[in-house]
Image (cartoon, grey):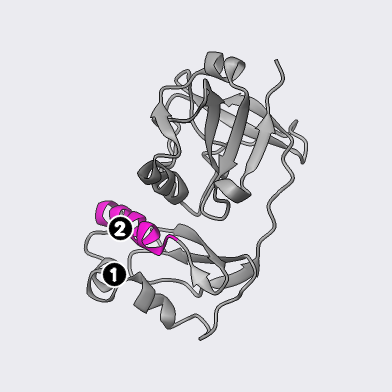
Amino acid sequence: MSVALVESIRIERGQIHLLALHEARMRRSLGELAPKGRLLAALEQRGLSALLEDYLPKYLPEHLTKLRFVYGADRIETPTLTPYQARDIRQIRAVHLPDRASYRHKWLDRSALIRPAYLGQDEEPLYILGGQITDTSYTNVALYIEGLWRTPEAPLLHGVMRAHLLEQGRIHPAPLTLDDLERAEAIRLFNAMMPLEQCIEINLPH
């Protein structure tokens, strides 16, 4: 599979969450990377919900579950369903990325996202690119500054939960630097599996 991308989708209480946003991201990526592939045509003809029906059980899990699948130009690989448990993250540490680092698409290969060996299991890198705060290794972020949750305006990956929260007006895009991290009261780590109500929140001592 020359193009290998991945999606992770939250299932809870028997419902698939934010499916339209996941499909929109798939269409954008395939439209750029594999516009003549069979999968993009299938998404346009049937939609992601119908394609997933070929793989999923009739009754979806009630407990929090990750639906994960790899896909390429022509097909979706067999999806997996696994119970989801958020990691116990207690601290973030700034990690500077090379200026040419990029993770615009949700690649299966995550080698562009450096995780230094010195980080502990309860620590998570906060990537800095060109002086700007971006993401962690698996979440978008928001900083609580002056009564608002502000999210980096130029993340490495435009996550579906980020898009959803922006639509709701619950987070606000802004250029953020390490100086902003110093004045923030807290940071939230969120992704498709962790909405704000279930996200990781770390108070920032100053």
**Residue type marked 2:** Leu
- Badge 2: few (under 14), some or many (20 or more) residues near its Cα, within 10 Å? many
Q: Residue 99 bears which disc, if any?
A: none
In terms of depth relative to the viewer, which is nearer, 147 or 155? 147
Q: Element at badge 2? A: helix
In the picture of the structure, the residue carrying the numbered disc 2 is: 30
Query: Is 121 contained in the magenta span?
Result: no
- The quarter of the rendered structure image containing the N terminus is bottom left
Segment tinted magenta in the rendering:
18-32
Query: Is 30 contained in the magenta span?
Result: yes
Q: Is residue 118 above or below residue 25?
A: above
Q: Is residue 200 above or below residue 116?
A: below
Q: Residue at x 40, y 25 (%)?
A: 174
Residue 37: x %, y % from top left: 26, 66
Label pair 1/2, CB-CB below 8 angstroms: yes
**Residue type marked 1:** Leu
Q: Element at badge 1? A: helix
Q: Residue at x 26, y 51 (%)?
A: 32
Label 1 vs label 2: CA separation?
10 Å
Pointer 1 or 2: first along the chain? 2
Q: Residue at x 47, y 18 (%)?
A: 131
Query: In the figure, residue 63 lies in which quadrant?
Result: bottom right
> Furthest-front residue in view?
147
Residue 22 visible, this angle: yes
Residue 58: x %, y % from top left: 51, 86
In the picture of the structure, the residue carrying the numbered disc 1 is: 43
In terms of depth relative to the viewer, which is nearer, 54 or 206? 206
Q: Residue at x 53, y 46 (%)?
A: 110
Residue 125: x %, y % from top left: 63, 33
